[in-house]
Amino acid sequence: MELTYNERDKVPGSRRLASSVRSILGRQETGIILLCVILTAFFYSRNPAMLAPTTVVSILRTMAFPALIGMGMVQLMIAGEIDLSTGAMMSLGAVFAAKLIRDAGIPIPAAVACSLGAAILVGLTNAFFTVKVGVPAVITTIGTMFIVRGISYSFTNGLPIYPLPAEVGIIGTWRPLGFSFTFFLALGVMIVVQILLIWTRWGSALFATGGNKLAAQVCGINTDRVKTICFVVTSLLAGMAGMLTMSQLPLTPGDPIIGKNLELHILVGVIIGGVSFYGGRGSAVGAFVGVFFIQLVRSGLVIGRFDSFLQTPALGFLLLLAAIFDVLRHRRDEG
Amino acid sequence: MTTKQATPPEASYRQPFYKRVLGVTELGVFAAVAVFFVAFTLADKSMANPANLARMALQGSFLGLAAFAMSFLMIAGEIDLSSGGTAGLSAAVAGVLMMNFGWPEWASCTAALAAAVLVGLLNAFITLKVHMPSFFATLGTSFLVSGLAIWILKGAWFYVADQIPALLKVLNPSPLFALPWIFIALLMAYLVGDFLMRTSRLGPTLMAVGGNRRAAEIVGINVPLVKTLCFVFVSVCCGLAGILVMAYSGTTDASIGDGWLLWVIAIAIIGGGSLQGGTGSIIGAFFGTVLIQIIRMGLLNANVQTNAQGIVIGVILIVAASLDVLRRKSIQY
C-alpha cells in the first residue's frame, strides 16, 4: 500500500510502525537474509564446522570476487541488459597481466593498466553489438564469452603462467581484520553503487533506461550511452576481479581457468537479490546479499558433506526458481 | 501511426530475374559454403578427398540434427539454449542405465529420449505458462540439465561401444558414395521438412505463430500447443544427437554437448533463421550445417587448437546474429 506523505502523517503511530515493519519484511533482501540464516542452521546441523571462524572468513573471501563483479552487473541489469562474459573476462584479465609481467617484462602497475584497457575493449565490444547493432545481449555476450576465453587459452596454451614476481601477491595476501582486501573493496563498491542508485542522477537514469526506454529518451537520457557505460564498468570490474584472484592464489599463477562458471554464480546471485531480468529494478545491497547467498549454498554443500556434483544443478535450480519468482513479481507489478 | 502494408506475394514475380535470384535467402549461405570449401581445399588438398568428405558428413550430422529441429522452433519465435545440456543428459541417462543397471540398448535409449521429452516440456512450461522469455528460461534449464548430467555420471565416463550394436549400424557407411546412413537420413529429413514447410499448412502455421502471435490466435491456431510441440521436438532431436555422439565416440560423457548451443544457433541464423521468429528456412539450415562443418574441419586440419576454436565460434555467432539484425532492418518498410 502506497501512502502519500501527507496522509501518512495522519496515520496513528502504532499503525505506522506496523506498516514500516511490513515494508521491511516485504523487501526481498530481508527474505534472502532469513533464508541465509535458515540454510546456515541447516548446514550447521549437518556439520558444526559451518560456523567455525575459518569457514566464515573463507566464504566471505570467496564471495568477494563475484560480489565485486555483481556491482557492475546490478547496474547493467537495472539498465535492462545482461553480461555472460564476466567469467571469461576474469580469466583474460589475469592471464593478460601475467603474460605482460612475465614475458614482456613490463612493470606490474603498467601491466595492470594494460589489462584493464583490454577489459574496457571487451566491454565496448559487448556494448557495440548489443546497443548499436541490436543483437540481444544474451547472444552477444555468450559470443564474447567464447571469444575472450578462447583468447585467454591461446595466450597460455591452456597452462598457468608462472612464476610471477612475489610483488603480484602483495594485495592478495594482505588480510585486513582477517578478511581480504577484495572483500573490503567489494563492500566499498557496494556502498558507492547503492548511493549512486538511490541519490544520484546516474541512478535515476539507470532505472529510467531499464524501466521505460522510450520515456527515458523523451526525458533526454542518452540510453545508449548509459548502457555502454554499464557494459564497460562490468567488464572492468571483471578484469579487476580476475587480477585480484590471481594475486590471492598460491604462487600467483595467471591461470586461464580463473572465473570458470563464475558468470552463472554472479547472475543467479544478482537475480536472487531482487534484480529483474526485465530491467528497471534492483539494489546493490540486494545483489551483494544474493551473491553471498549463492556462496553460502556452494560452500554449505561441501561442508554439509553433500555430493559435490550437486553444485551445478543446485545453481541451475536456484536460477530457475529466482527467475520464475522474478516473472511472477513482474506480472504483479504490471497488474 | 501509419498502417504497415504487406507487399503482395505477386510483387516478387514482377521483379527482374537477377533480383529474384538475389532475394533467395539461402543464396548467401550457399555462396559462403562454396567460397570456404574452395579456400580450405586450396590450403589443404586433403579437404576434398572422399574419405574426408564422408567423415565430415558423419560428424556434421549430430549438430545438423539439432539445428534441423532448432530452425522449426526459431521460426515459431522461440529459442532453446539448453540443446547441449539435453544432449549430455540423454547420453548420461542412456550410459548409466546400460552400464550400471544392465538395461538393454533399446530400453535405455528410449528412457534417454523420454528424459529429453521432459526437458522439452519443462522448457515449454516455463516459457509458455510462467511467461518467461525463452532466452532466459532455457538458459536456466541448460545449467540445470547439464548439472544433472554431471551428477548422474558423478564425473565418471563409461565405455559403451560394446553395448550398442544397433546404434553403431546407423553410423555405418551406406552404399551411396560411402556416406553414413545417419547423414542420408538427416538429408531426407531436411528435404521432407523443407517440402512440408513450403507446401503444407505447417509453414504458414509456424510463421504465423512466430511472426504475429495475436493474429495466429485469431485465425484459430493453438499457439501454446504449436510452441510446446516445437520445444519437445528440439529436445528429442538434441537427445537423439547426444545418444548418437555417444555411439560415435563409444563413451558417455556429460560434456558431450558443451558448446553446442552456439553452433546450433549460429547454424539456424546463418541458414536464414531469425532471433525474432516468423521467418526461416529449413534447407538453409542444412547449408548452414555444411558451412559450419567445413569451417570446423578446416580449423582442425589447420591445427588450430580446440581452445582457440572458441574464438572462431564466438565470432561466427556474433557475425551471424548481426547479419540477422541488419537483414531484418533492411526489410522493414
Image (tube, coloured by chain):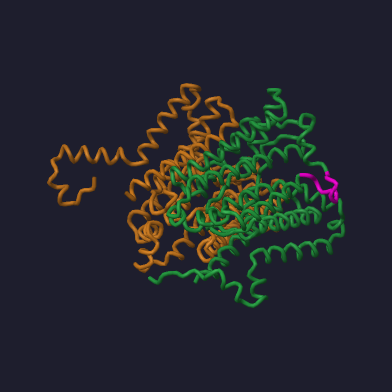
Would you say residue B176 sits in the magenta stretch? yes
Residue B92 shows in the view: yes
The correct choice, above or below, for A125 with respect to B54 in the image is below
Quadrant location of the N terminus of chain B in the rendered image:
bottom left
> Which chain identifier belongs to the orange chain?
A
Residue B3 in the image: state x and y as whole percent: 41, 70
Residue A249 in the image: state x and y as whole percent: 61, 42
Rendered residue at 74%/50% (across/down): B60
Would you say residue A159 sits in the magenta stretch? no
Residue A149 shows in the view: no
> Which chain identifier belongs to the green chain?
B
Residue A177 in the image: state x and y as whole percent: 46, 38
Rendered residue at 83%/57% (across/down): B47
Which residues, given as a range, are shown in magenta? Answer: B173-181
Number of numbered discs visible in the structure rendering: 0
State which quadrant residue B234 falls in: top right
| Residue furthest out toward the bottom | B16
Q: In front here: A14 or B182?
A: B182
The correct choice, above or below, for A66 with respect to B89 in the image is below
Q: In front here: B151 or A257?
A: B151
Residue A278 in the image: state x and y as whole percent: 42, 52
Q: In front here: A222 or B264?
A: B264
Magenta region, mostly helix, strand or loop?
loop
Rendered residue at 51%/69% (across/down): B332
